[in-house]
Amino acid sequence: MYLNILVYGRLEKPVLEDLKSRHHVKFFKDNSENTPEFRDFLSIADGIIGLSLQVNSELLDQAPNLKIVSNVSVGYNNLDVKALSERNVMATNTPGILTDTVADMAMGLILSTARRMPELDQYVKSGQWLDNLTEEHYGVDVHHKKLGIIGMGRIGQAIAKRAHFGFDMEILYHNRTRKEDAEKEYDAAYLALDELLQEADFICLITPLTKETEGMIGKREFQLMKKSAIFINVSRGKTIVETELIEALKAGEILAAGLDVFEKEPLELDNELLTLKNVVTLPHIGSSTYETELQMSKLAAVNLEAGLNGEKPPNLINAEVWN
Ligand SMILES: NC(=O)c1ccc[n+]([C@@H]2O[C@H](COP(=O)([O-])OP(=O)(O)OC[C@H]3O[C@@H](n4cnc5c(N)ncnc54)[C@H](O)[C@@H]3O)[C@@H](O)[C@H]2O)c1
Ligand SMILES: O=C(O)[C@H](O)CO
């Protein structure tokens, strides 16, 4: 079947070319959804595939032929799942395939924040390394510290595995439900959120963004953390209150933060986070490796084609549309 496929934001080239060989495909860049070209194509689209398109009732009402929206991401906070289901449109994501890659990056962010690697890289490159280092350049140890993981799902557990076996860290976690397998495997202790915030040396947030998790870490939570705590956010920017993180960092309520995600992405140049030496910022690179991005695009295409062919996609989010 030759169908109209709207590609938004990102899809790896080989997958895009393959889709083009079988369908009428149009690629739209980020933030192009208000252009007449996007609206015209949306009105005939059978399927959407890509990253970060905000899919809500308003958009869906302009897409009468739409059968499926296939996200090239595990997170699907960009999708109004209720609005999709009400219109019998399938929604899919790409879980699992990126878990290890994101966990590797989270460990990198923990290490580079604790050991101040980006700051000291600049120190070398700017010609300031003229003598032996003194304590003003020291970082803090990661090994044998307490890592508090909030969101002990696929990625949370892959981080726990690395931290426990690779860095001898003590694993504390908070999750909606207890994860007994992870408790056994990584000797992980379940704690209530406030307890974890008070106990952990490193706090890594890796929940999905939902109504419950939006703004879950703010002023009160930063004040509960140790003054020596390092806060890591790999989930979504809106799971924390960014202005309150900035205040906590400036007031010395916590030691440092490593951030892969932000309330508004790309991060704006006047964001105060960029002025703080004790913050490591990354441009949302959790899954950004050649291997993993290609696999994610391939899986998203498999989901898309299944939905378009009237088969159940392997990663259907809104199972209710199938029954
Ligand atoms: N930075 C990146 O590039 C990047 C990459 C991949 C995923 N992510 C984010 O990570 C999220 C998690 O991915 P995953 O594959 O591990 O998902 P998952 O569904 O396997 O795990 C999420 C965990 O969070 C828990 N959770 C949900 N709501 C909670 C709450 N209110 N309090 C405590 N725990 C709660 C769930 O019970 C689950 O165990 C994604 O939804 C996405 O937003 C970011
Ligand atoms: O949710 C995900 O898969 C990542 O954040 C990709 O953007």
Image: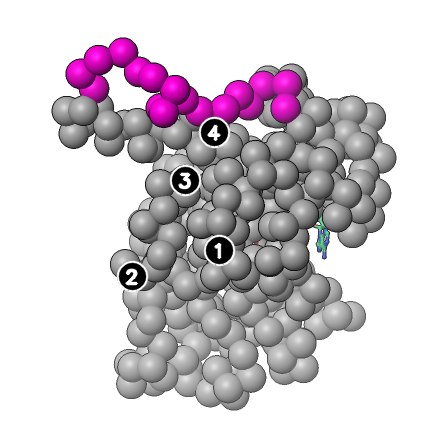
Q: Over which residues does the magenta segment extend?
A: 129-145
Q: Which element type, helix, strand or loop, lies under badge 1?
A: helix
Distance from Cα at disc 2 to Cα at disc 3: 17 Å
Dominant SS type (magenta): loop
Q: Which residue is mark 4?
A: 114
Mark with earlier residue (2, 1): 1
Disc 4 CB within 8 Å of nearest ligand 1 atom: no
Asked if the residue at tag 4 contacts the one at tag 1, i.e. Cβ–Cβ closer than 8 Å, the answer is no
Q: Which residue is mark 1?
A: 247
- Which numbered disc covers residue 316? none
| Mark toward the viewer: 3 or 4 | 3
| Residue located at (67% from left, 28% from top) | 146
Relative to 255, does residue 139 appear above or below in the rendering? above
Tell me the kind of residue under disc 2.
Answer: Asp
Tell me the kind of residue under disc 4.
Answer: Ala
Q: Which element type, helix, strand or loop, lies under badge 3?
A: loop
Nearest the viewer among 132 and 308 is 132
Q: Which residue is mark 3?
A: 278
Tell me the kind of residue under disc 3.
Answer: Asn
Disc 3 CB within 8 Å of nearest ligand 1 atom: no
